[in-house]
Amino acid sequence: MKLRIRMALGFFASLALFMLAAKVDAARAPQSAVPKFEVSFPAAAHSGAITGRAFVLVSQQDTPEPRIQVGGFGDSVAMFGADVNVLGYPTRSLRDIPTGEYYVQALVNIYTQFHRSDGHTIWAHMDQWEGQQFNLSPGNLYSEVQRVHLDRSAGYDVRLSLTKVIPPVQVPADTTWVKHVKIQSEVLTRFWGHPMYIGAIVLLPKGYDEQQNSAYPVVYEEGHFSLNAPLGFSTENQPVSAERRAMLANLNHETAYEFYQSWNSDKFPRMIAVTFQHPTPYFDDSYAVNSANNGPYGDALIEEMIPYLEAHFRMIPKPYARVLIGGSTGGWESMGVQVFYPDFFGGTWTLYPDPIDFRRYGLLNIYEDDNAFFEPGHTWVQTPRYLMRKPNGQPEITVQAFSQLEDVLGSHGRSGQQLEIWEATYGPVGEDGYPKPLWDKQTGKIDHSVALYMRDHGYDLSYNLRTNWATLGPKVRGKIHVYVGDMDHFYLNLAVYMVEDALKSVQNPPCDCDFQYGRPMKGHGWQPTSSANLVRWMAEHIEKNAPVGESTAAWHY
């Protein structure tokens, strides 16, 4: 049987999920009065049928090839995706593409069937250790780039054959400094009904091999999936442009090589740094906590990965010697993990975190606003809500446009993008087994039952702390440090302001928190000092809180 995906105006597939049959046909088809792309693949590229999502990418440039140009923020290629129907971004329809010369390419993101322990069976992309980047994921199929003339008035019929297969990821080799760990998680495998893996990249301190009797405290770095060493460490002294150096200086970051120089210097805290790797079928990162849709990733990291690391590396296996750091997604995670596992960690250095108070979910108040796309309170005009701005205040991307992008990248919350991983992490499972949306991607209508689920299950960290301070307060006092720029690109400073105000008023005990803001016009990525100095601050905190009689001389210098 052969079933061809036809990306034609007004096309709606009759199947819940599409299946492509093997076919060799890369020739240009005759012109059609209706704009249309036909996507197929040969048996040599993939034997049997595929369940997944097909994309056609349209660009005015061929370098890099269009599939590499796909990005979540800022300008991107025009793209059209289909499993049940055809959606487009930034244009809704193929007819909206202006007449002209373009480079086009097709891509298929292959899905895996999961029979979860909660009784739901779903289809989603199984990460291949690329961090849910569908345009780079091993095993996905893509076509050659074709230069075509698209005339929206005359119509066109372009055929693209998926003859290429993305090769496996090459994990960097271990070095004296950096070690790579990957284990199968028993708890996640049970939940997903499929082998699931978590990993870690371990950065060792200077003298680790020589000081065989020494054990070290650990900095756990949270954040997006990466194959790079923790904290930006690199022994390669790469050239840095003047523009990039100015950008780093504006945010108080050093280069990767400069961080290595500090890490390798004589008077630097001897600590181990660890970056986790925990991609899910919904994102490149699980947010490091248990959730109804992602499964027990928090337990997998706390009960499986960290014990494995402490058994294989000379780490001090005590709460005071485990500290957290992370920015953006990793910022929410570092604070979230400290709140969800307050007895396990000794402090968090949280940088420009994803919303930690859902009364400021970006610009939204998800408990009171009725619509995510437009500001409430207007009668005669619709004022759009923005997801992103520049530090000078220039708005860049609306919530509505980004919701449209996610709708194109994947149905049922499978876009692998930012808004939908928040839904997958914080929200409930829908009746269909996929994450229940916080708002309708077409209309922006907010489902307040989802918002309240997020709040009542602890993911609104501000509400969690305020509500449970009698229990949490004694465990997190003096452990919370939060830093963000006053003009964060994603409005993340707004939630931080609210958390600081809330925690100023708590007593018995007081919070003894540390909040700092970058001013003026400091955007996403700002931190109050260099990464090396942040490690020094964490080392001082660990030394201050070490049990009486426990020597820190072996690791402090």
Image (spheres, grey):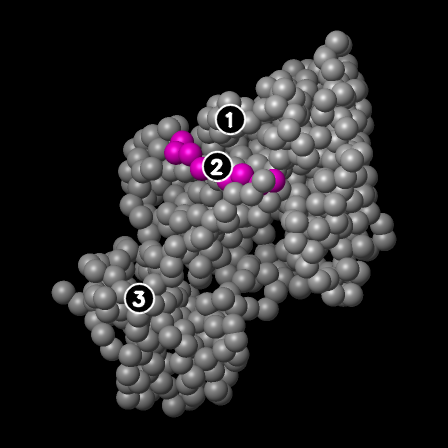
**Amino acid type, label 2:** Val
Bin the neighbour count of mark 3 within 10 Å (Cα to Cα): few under 14, some 14-19, many 20 and up: some
Q: In the image, 127: left or right of 91? A: left
Tell me the residue at 32%/44% (across/down).
122
What residue span does the magenta drawing correspond to?
Answer: 177-185
Q: Residue at x 59, y 61 (%)?
A: 73
Number of marks present in the image shown: 3
Task: Mark yes or no: residue 86 visible.
Answer: no
Establish if 329 lies above or below 92. Answer: above
Q: Is residue 332 left or right of residue 42?
A: right
Residue 343 or 385: which is nearer the viewer?
Answer: 343
Q: Residue at x 34, y 68 (%)?
A: 164
Query: On the image, numbered disc 1 is attached to which residue?
Result: 312
Q: Single out the residue that lies furthest toward the left.
A: 1
Number of the label disc, if any, that sits on residue 208: none
View extreme (top): residue: 549
* Mark 3 or 2, nearer chain start: 3
Mark 1 vs 2, N-terminal side? 2
Query: What distance separates the C-alpha of mark 1 from that of mark 2?
Result: 10 Å
Residue 292 lies, with reference to residue 38, above or below; the image says above
Q: Nearer the viewer, residue 27 or 36?
A: 27
Residue type, mark 3 in image: Phe
- Label 3 to label 2: alpha-carbon separation: 45 Å
Report which residue position mark 2 lands on: 181
Question: Badge 1 local density, few (<14 within 10 Å), some, or many (20+)?
Answer: few
Tags 1 and 2 touching, CB below 8 Å: yes
